[in-house]
Image: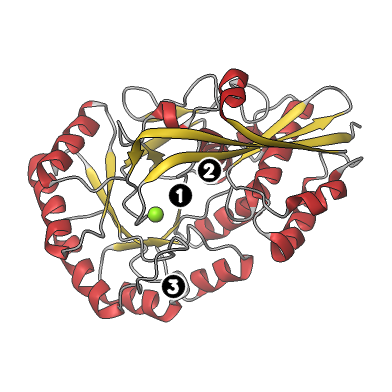
Amino acid sequence: MSRITHIEITHHQLVLDPPFPASWDTRPRTHFPATVLRVHDDEGRTGIGSGDAMYGFSDYAHLFIGTDPLDLERHHAVLMNIEFHAGRPWPMDVALWDLAGKVRNEPVWRMLGGHTDRLRAYVSSGVHRPVEDMVRVAQQVVQAGFPALKVRFGRPRFEDDLAVVQAIHEAVGDRLELMVDCNQGWRMPWDTAQPWTLGHALVVARQLEQLGVYWMEEPLHRGDYEGLRALRKQVGIRVAGGEMTREPYEFRELLERDCLDVFQPDAVCSGGITGLAKVARAVAAQGRIFTPHTWGNGIGLMANLQLTAGTVGAPFIEWPLDAPEWSAERRDYMLTHPLRPDGQGWFHLPQTPGLGIELDEAALARTLSSAATFH
Ligand SMILES: [Mg+2]
């Protein structure tokens, strides 16, 4: 049995020049922060996690020192308590799975059950571009072999959002599934805009349904269970959501009240791999789709790929990519090898133990802003 000896947390900032004008953020992003967490055991192994800033975790890191890394359910119970008191500690759960995989000499997706060894990626765009540029993006996505593309709503005029979907549908509609993210579930701290009403969501949903859109994402606030349920009753298009939903009882409510067709919690934001493996199985058992939000860095993306491949699989999984502002090199700057699918959009799960990622120490040193170690 090995023991956890110490935990390192480092904060990094990648300068984004040109900035990334994320469509869901009213402020263009000039930096891409990352927090990298490393859990070390007394046999020289290291588990890696990332995906949340981990503010508040410092007060509780000692709760893991001296414990067996394989006690994943015990660690998860402690992390659920930490989340309640201090914020989202889920990169710790991801790092523990990476370490557990290295102890067991097994990839995480196999430890979870080995549902599939590959997942098909959909390109998740992040920038509001003019219609003709969005059509060009869609054509490039088709040429790169991807089966699906997600576009973002939220331009000042709804007609301009709709024109993008219509133009892409006309240009490549028979070769590409389209998803639309309405981004009404949550807001950045400085954005005080109200979420859409059910009435507005219905108008949008009917238009998207006519255009054959595969799913409509976050059409209402994440807590508007009655609105989501009413929307699903009145339209045929799939409704997706839950990317920032945190508590197990919230997922239970969303399932029992028939609020969503597609559940999208992210292992580095909600519940970790341990918690979401249970959510994924509950969602699949009800005949719904589980396919996580993955927008963040390559470590978080990999955590979600391992989680999904290991448990229930998914028709498509989110692949954040919208170059030049959001390239694989920017997204995965902390990794020696940016994650890439094959020429048909399939991502093949690593056969190496744990998450199967390797940190680019030089890039991490260049971008380091602060570091702390807990014994
Ligand atoms: Mg989303």
Q: Residue at x 45, y 77 (%)?
A: 225
x and y, in percent, of residue 132 in the image? 10, 41
Ligand 1 within 8 Å, label 2 CB:
no
What residue appears at the point 80 percent right and 31 percent down from the top-left corner? 40
The mark nearer the N terminus, 1 or 2, is 1
Q: Which residue is mark 2?
A: 308
Image quadrant holding the C terminus, namely top right
Q: Is residue 96 left or right of residue 20?
A: right
> Which residue type carries mark 3?
Asp
* Of the pair 163 and 29, the residue shown nearer to us: 29
| For marks 3 and 1 on the same chain, the one whose residue lies earlier in the sequence | 3
Q: Is residue 281 above or below residue 117?
A: below
- The answer to whether marks 1 and 2 mark residues whose Cβ atoms lie closer than 8 Å is yes
Residue 224 position in % (x across, y down): 43, 77
**Whole-Å distance between the Cαs marked 3 and 1?**
17 Å
Which element is circle 1 on?
loop
**Residue marked by disc 3:** 258
Up the image or down, 223 lies above or below 336; here it is: below
Give x and y (percent) for residue 7: 79, 37
Does the rendering let one see residue 117? yes
Q: What is the count of numbered marks?
A: 3
The residues bearing labels 1 and 2 have C-alpha atoms spaced at a distance of 7 Å
Q: Give the residue displayed 65% in from the left and 44% down from the top.
A: 91
Residue 291 badge: 1
